[in-house]
Image (cartoon, grey):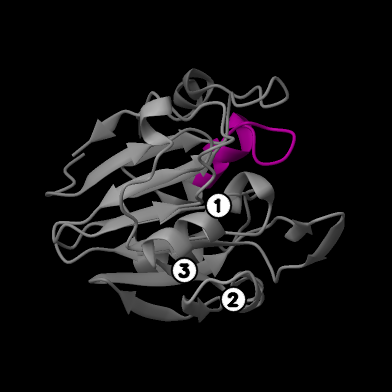
Amino acid sequence: MNLKGIKLTWLGHSAFRIETPEGKRFYVDPWIGGNPMCPDSEKNVQRADVLICTHGHFDHIADAVDVAKKHDSVAVGIYELCLWLEKKGVKQLAPMNKGGTQTVADVKITMVHAVHSCGILDGDQIVYGGEACGYVLEFSNGVKLYHAGDTNVFSDMTIIRDLYAPKIAMLPIGDRFTMSPCEAAYACKLLKPETVIPMHFGTFPLLTGKPSELQALVPEVKVVELKPGQTIS
């Protein structure tokens, strides 16, 4: 896997910090402070130029408001989620919807489908947060990453392959609330990535899927098991 100057750090669960070749710092699904897998050394966010949110569940956006307000980050998300973030005081917003593409901080961001729910826990109520989604990120060096968000496998992953051809895919494998390694292996057959980075596993006892189980099912794909806080470049 050649990231060509991109620095990719897994923060546990579905949270990633990505530093672009230009030095911009992105956070995907910023659940940091309360994330039991996130190392203490990563919990004080020093800089965040862009936040990318796949959906409104707490384990994906719990720190989005605080981080965005502290660092004046640009928040990317589906339209309804961005409206909610705006109501909470986030100033810089880049709303979009599925099939749309925009460029933020030198990264071409395309929102794609995901099969999941998306209610935002707001106090003691659950409010509508739009639909769950995934993203294909294309960097200035030509590298394309696919962050699937929380999803089951779906047949239109072949469209993601045909239109965008990401070589690196971050796929949930924990089971119960997302795909297990079995469904993720089928997703690999549809997407045909060269490398898969498993996510959304091991955070809680209910999330039982293991990267080794996925690797056994897709020997033709390189499954990279990151440790929380580990950076690859």
- Label 2 sits on what residue type? Glu
Task: Sort mark 2 into few (<14), some (14-19) or many (20+) by Cα contacts within 10 Å.
Answer: some
Task: Sort mark 3 into few (<14), some (14-19) or many (20+) by Cα contacts within 10 Å.
Answer: many
* N-terminal-most mark, 3 or 2: 3
- Tell me which residue sits at (31%, 53%) in the image: 47
Residue 71 in the image: x percent, y percent? 37, 61
Task: Sort mark 1 into few (<14), some (14-19) or many (20+) by Cα contacts within 10 Å.
Answer: many
Check the picture and name the quadrant holding the N terminus: top left
Q: Are marks 3 and 1 in contact (CB under 8 Å)?
A: no
| Residue position for label 2 | 86
Residue 32 in the image: x percent, y percent? 50, 40
| Residue position for label 3 | 75
Residue 58 in the image: x percent, y percent? 67, 48
Cα separation, mark 3 vs mark 1, equals: 16 Å
- Tell me which residue sits at (44%, 24%) in the image: 215
Q: Secondary structure at mark 2?
A: helix
- Tell me which residue sits at (47%, 43%) in the image: 15
Residue 166 in the image: x percent, y percent? 34, 56
Question: Magenta residues, as a range?
Answer: 173-187
Q: Which mark is residue 149?
A: 1
Cα separation, mark 1 vs mark 2, equals: 22 Å
Q: Secondary structure at mark 1?
A: loop
Q: Is residue 92 above or below residue 41?
A: below
- Label 3 sits on what residue type? Ala
Q: Foreground: 233 or 2?
A: 233
Q: Secondary structure at mark 3?
A: strand
